[in-house]
């Protein structure tokens, strides 16, 4: 009986050890399996962390999309024709202001005492020469009344009777000194040769031709600048009294 019991106990011990061993193996397997599951989960979490990185990279690109749709080159192409158009519409550098006309006056030369005049009373044609002549105080049927058509600091000199303006025949700065002046259809702006500006002088004002920088003067062809019918010319600006002009109210 004792031997049988011992065998039974021993058998029970062996089966318990086997169970224990089996449980240890399971635990070991579980221990080995758990780390293997963790790496499987970790890679799956890496794309999750990488996704925000991708969204962060694309987020700054959103403000760039308008520039891609409307690049600077396209903007410049759209802008250039507009600038060219505005330049074509306004070829001069004269300030874009509404021109104003002064009261009528007589333009008298401070040196000779004679007035700017046009030949052919009351019937002046374009290209009629400007000269100096005896001032006509009554102004009746005469061509000695003028106005300034002001645009900023520059102005046209317009004859009241004919509506024509002082003009220098030629092309801009290529107009030579001593070029005689005439009247022509008025054209406001530096695109033409009719604009002047005034500067104070000893006995009145110097009238400076904007395009050339020359001054309004009386021709010296006769040697005596007080002679009648001497043409008006452009000349190098100087201290000569014949370049001083007075605006006498009409």
Image: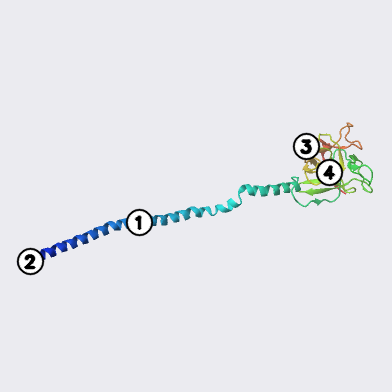
Residue at label 4?
A: 246
Question: Which tag, 4 or 2, sits closer to the chain's start?
Answer: 2
Please tell me whether mark 3 sits on a helix, a strand or a loop: helix
Question: Which tag, 2 or 1, sits closer to the chain's start?
Answer: 2
Quadrant of the frame with the N terminus: bottom left
Q: Residues within 10 Å of mark 3 (few under 14, many from 20)?
A: few
Q: Is residue 201 left or right of residue 134?
A: left
Q: Closer to the camera, 75 or 166?
A: 75
Residue at label 1?
A: 40
**Residue 19 position by quadrant:** bottom left
Residue at label 3?
A: 173
Q: Residues within 10 Å of mark 1 (few under 14, many from 20)?
A: few
- Name the residue located 21 percent from the left edge and 61 percent from the top edge: 22
Q: Can you tell which of label 2 and label 3 is closer to the viewer?
A: 2
Q: Can you tell which of label 4 and label 2 is closer to the viewer?
A: 2
Q: Can you tell which of label 4 and label 3 is closer to the viewer?
A: 3
Q: Find residue 113 and name its label.
A: none
Q: Closer to the camera, 172 or 106?
A: 172
Question: Which tag, 4 or 3, sits closer to the chain's start?
Answer: 3
Please tell me whether mark 2 sits on a helix, a strand or a loop: helix
Above or below, 49 relative to 226: below
Please tell me whether mark 1 sits on a helix, a strand or a loop: helix
Q: Can you tell which of label 4 and label 1 is closer to the viewer?
A: 1
Please tell me whether mark 4 sits on a helix, a strand or a loop: strand
Above or below, 28 relative to 133: below
Q: Find residue 4 and name its label.
A: 2
**Residue 93 position by quadrant:** top right
Counting from the top left corner in percent of width and height, residue 122 is at 94, 47
Q: Residues within 10 Å of mark 4 (few under 14, many from 20)?
A: some
Question: Which tag, 3 or 1, sits closer to the chain's start?
Answer: 1
Q: CA distance from mark 4 to mark 2?
A: 154 Å
Q: CA distance from mark 4 to mark 1?
A: 102 Å
């Amino acid at each position: 009986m004792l031997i049988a019991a011992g065998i039974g106990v021993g058998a029970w011990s062996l089966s318990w050890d086997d169970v224990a061993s089996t449980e240890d193996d399971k635990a070991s397997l579980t221990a080995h399996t758990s780390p293997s599951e963790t790496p499987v989960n970790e890679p799956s979490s890496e794309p999750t962390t990488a996704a925000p990185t991708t969204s962060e990279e694309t987020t700054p690109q959103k403000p760039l999309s308008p520039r891609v749709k409307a690049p600077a080159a396209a903007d410049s192409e759209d802008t250039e024709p507009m600038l060219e158009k505005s330049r074509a519409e306004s070829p001069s550098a004269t300030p874009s202001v509404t021109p104003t006309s002064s009261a009528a006056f007589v333009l008298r030369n401070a040196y000779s005492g004679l007035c700017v005049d046009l030949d052919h009373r009351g019937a002046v044609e374009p290209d009629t020469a400007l000269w100096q002549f005896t001032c006509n105080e009554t102004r009746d049927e005469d061509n000695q009344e003028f106005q300034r058509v002001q645009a900023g600091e520059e102005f046209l000199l317009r004859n009241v009777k004919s509506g024509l303006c002082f003009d220098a025949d030629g092309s801009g700065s290529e107009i030579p000194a001593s070029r005689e002046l005439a009247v022509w259809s008025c054209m406001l702006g530096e695109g033409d040769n009719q604009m002047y500006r005034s500067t104070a002088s000893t006995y009145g004002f110097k009238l400076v031709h904007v395009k050339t920088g020359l001054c309004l003067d009386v021709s010296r062809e006769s040697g005596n600048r007080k002679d009648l019918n001497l043409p008006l010319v452009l000349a190098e600006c100087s201290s000569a009294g014949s370049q001083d002009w007075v605006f006498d109210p009409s």
